[in-house]
Amino acid sequence: MKLLSAFLLPAVIVCVALPAGAADPVDIQRTLQGVEDRYNHTQTLQLGFTETYRVQGRVRVERGELFLRKPGRMRWQYTAPAGKLFVSDGKFMYSYTPQENRAEKMKMKEADDLRAPLAFLLGKLHFADDFREFRAHPEAQGIYITAIPKSDKLPYSEISFLVAPDSSIRNLEVKGQDNSLLQFTFDNEKKDPKIQDSLFRFEAPAGAEFVDSSNTR
């Protein structure tokens, strides 16, 4: 999978659609504002993640640790499968798949991946810029929100996320246009930890096939 860059769209007025029994518009706006305030005032993040990908009856579960630094830098470091890696230095995206012993370089702004809804944490987060409709309902662990993007040309049709009382995002689900479902569960979130610059520099393992796609698009 590759990373999508088209996650900032022109701002318009948000249309809030709520099902029966859900939180009222004031509550949902307050919840979204809390998420924006939390992440817009954070420069670095460190989280544990479990990633589940479902498509056409197949299920793949992977785990690891995520490091983020504004602007535009991220590192998805997998422990299962061990060695799998996605790194962004803000300009280019690099991936390494140990099963294939293959590394690839691509332009971040031209890459294409369902993990794009998480990339908004790397920029200035403002939900009204990206989404045209929101639905919400309370759950035991917080408020569950489904957001419909403004553009129908993205690889995903909607995202859903669970917002905890401290305004952190605990779960994220991304529905693909191909009916796939990408789910993330996050834990052990650390705000503004000290993260070494070296984590966002990629070096392909010795002997790995290296494909440079950054000059072919």
Image: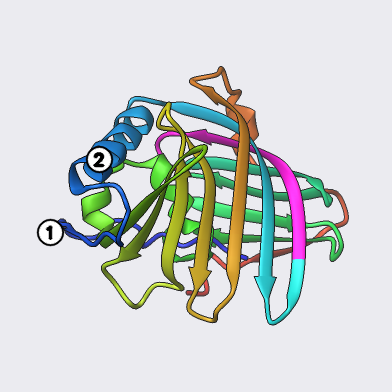
User: Identity of the amino acid at label 2?
Assistant: Asp
Badge number at residue 50: none
Judging from the image, the colouring scheme is rainbow
Label 1 sits on a secondary structure element that is: loop
Would you name the residue on which mark 1 appears? 12
The spot of residue 89 in percent (x, y) is: 52, 43
Identified at 30% across, 60% down, the residue is 20
Whether residue 69 appears in magenta in the rendering, the answer is yes
Q: Which residue is mark 2?
A: 27
Residue 216 lies, in percent from the top left, at 52, 74
Q: Nearer the viewer, residue 131 or 20?
A: 20
Q: As shown in the figure, which amino acid type bears the numbered disc 1?
A: Val
Which quadrant of the rendered structure holds the N terminus?
bottom right
Which residue ends up furthest to the top in the rendered image? 194
Q: Is residue 211 magenta?
A: no
Residue 39 occupies quadrant: top left
- Which one is closest to the eye, mark 1 or mark 2? 2
Q: Looking at this view, is 173 or 125 the one in front?
A: 173
Return the residue found at the far left: 13
Q: Which residues are magenta?
A: 60-72
Who's the residue at 46% across and 34% down the image? 164
At horizontal 76% and vertical 75% (from top left) the residue drawn is 58
Q: Position of residue 75 (x, y in %)?
A: 61, 41
Q: Is residue 3 left or right of residue 78?
A: left
> Which residue is rendered at x = 23% and y = 62% of the image?
17
Quick check: 155 left or right of 88?
left
Residue 67 lies in quadrant: top right
Q: Badge 2 local density, few (<14 within 10 Å), some, or many (20+)?
A: few
